[in-house]
Image (tube, rainbow, N blue to C red):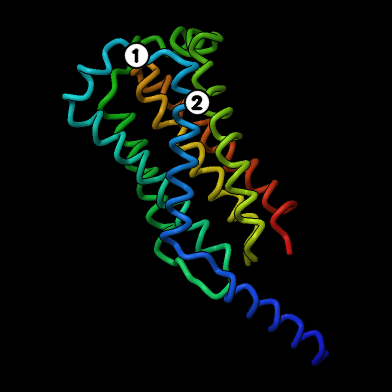
């Protein structure tokens, strides 16, 4: 029993010694995010009215919130990857950021048509649904590297770490879609921008349980 305890203590001590600084992690994160964004940028057209949108306060606010959610989730992942660190406030901040984004989507975007059945059937087209697929692809690319990094640590909650990596990546995808998608209706945003975030968070939880265990 004592040998097991000493072995575990040695593992934790080794983790502390090799712990990467937050600044170094964030530099890697921003470089990765820039590379992912540039790669997708050259593959997808930017919305025609993006210059006009940059003059709208709520559009800028939404971009800042998506960016903040991506970064805060990544920082939370960093702290969760080392058992000697804590991050009690970050998950709550993530929920607050996501809640604010949902409120903005419901209150500062047009509802479109009053016939919700017709509006919903229109959203089921491949043209509009492509937003969700693009977000998922960006999530896959970005989270692949975040999961690889997280495996170098020793997460005390593999499922939560998987969620954090996925939400950070999906938020980057949603931020990029702000410059690509010209559909500003609330229903479209909820279905094809927010729903993929929750979907990949669920998938990230399952994947984290499998690949981030130690």
Residue 113 appears in which quarter of the rendering? Answer: top left
Specify which label sits upstream in the sequence, 2 or 1. Answer: 2
Mark 2 or 1: the one toward you: 2
> Is residue 44 or residue 155 the one in the foreground?
44
- Percent x, y of residue 32: 49, 41
Q: Is residue 70 above or below residue 152?
A: above
Circles 2, 1 touching at the beta carbon (< 8 Å): no
Residue 27 shows which numbered tag? Answer: none
Residue 126 placement: quadrant: top right
Which label number is shown at residue 47? 1
Q: Position of residue 39 (x, y in %)?
A: 50, 26
What residue is shown with label 2? 39
Above or below for 29 versus 61: below
The N terminus lies in which quarter of the figure? bottom right
Q: Residue at x 55, y 63 (%)?
A: 80
Q: Residues within 10 Å of mark 2 (few under 14, many from 20)?
A: few
Q: State the CA–CA distance, disc 2 to disc 1.
A: 17 Å
Tag 1: Cα neighbours inside 10 Å, few (<14), some, or many (≥20)?
Answer: some
Task: Say which element carries label 2.
Answer: helix
Q: Which residue is more in the foreground, 161 or 194?
A: 161
Percent position of residue 151, x then y: 66, 56
Give me the residue at 49% from left, 24% from top.
40
Locate residue 182 relative to residue 150 in the image: left or right.
left
Residue nearer the viewer, 194 or 141: 141
> Observer-nearest residue: 129 or 153?
153
Name the residue at 53% across, 23% down: 134
Name the residue: 44% across, 10% down: 119
Quadrant, the C terminus:
bottom right
């Amino acid at each position: 029993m004592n040998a097991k305890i000493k072995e575990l203590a040695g593992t934790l001590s080794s983790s502390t010694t090799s712990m990467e600084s937050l600044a170094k992690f964030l530099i890697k994160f921003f470089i990765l995010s820039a590379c992912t964004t540039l790669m997708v940028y050259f593959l997808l057209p930017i919305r025609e009215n993006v210059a006009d949108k940059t003059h709208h306060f709520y559009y800028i606010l939404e971009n800042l919130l998506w960016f903040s959610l991506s970064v805060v989730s990544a920082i939370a992942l960093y702290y969760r990857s080392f058992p000697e660190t804590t991050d009690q406030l970050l998950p709550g901040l993530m929920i607050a950021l996501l809640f604010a984004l949902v409120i903005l989507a419901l209150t500062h975007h047009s509802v479109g048509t009053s016939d919700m059945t017709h509006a919903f059937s229109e959203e089921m087209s491949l043209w509009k649904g492509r937003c969700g697929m693009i977000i998922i692809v960006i999530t896959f690319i970005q989270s692949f590297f975040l999961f690889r990094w997280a495996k170098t640590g020793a997460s005390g909650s593999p499922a939560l770490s998987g969620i954090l990596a996925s939400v950070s990546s999906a938020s980057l995808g949603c931020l990029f879609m702000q410059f690509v998608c010209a559909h500003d209706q609330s229903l479209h945003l909820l279905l094809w921008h927010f729903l993929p975030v929750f979907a990949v968070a669920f998938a990230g939880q399952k994947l984290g349980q499998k690949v981030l265990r130690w």
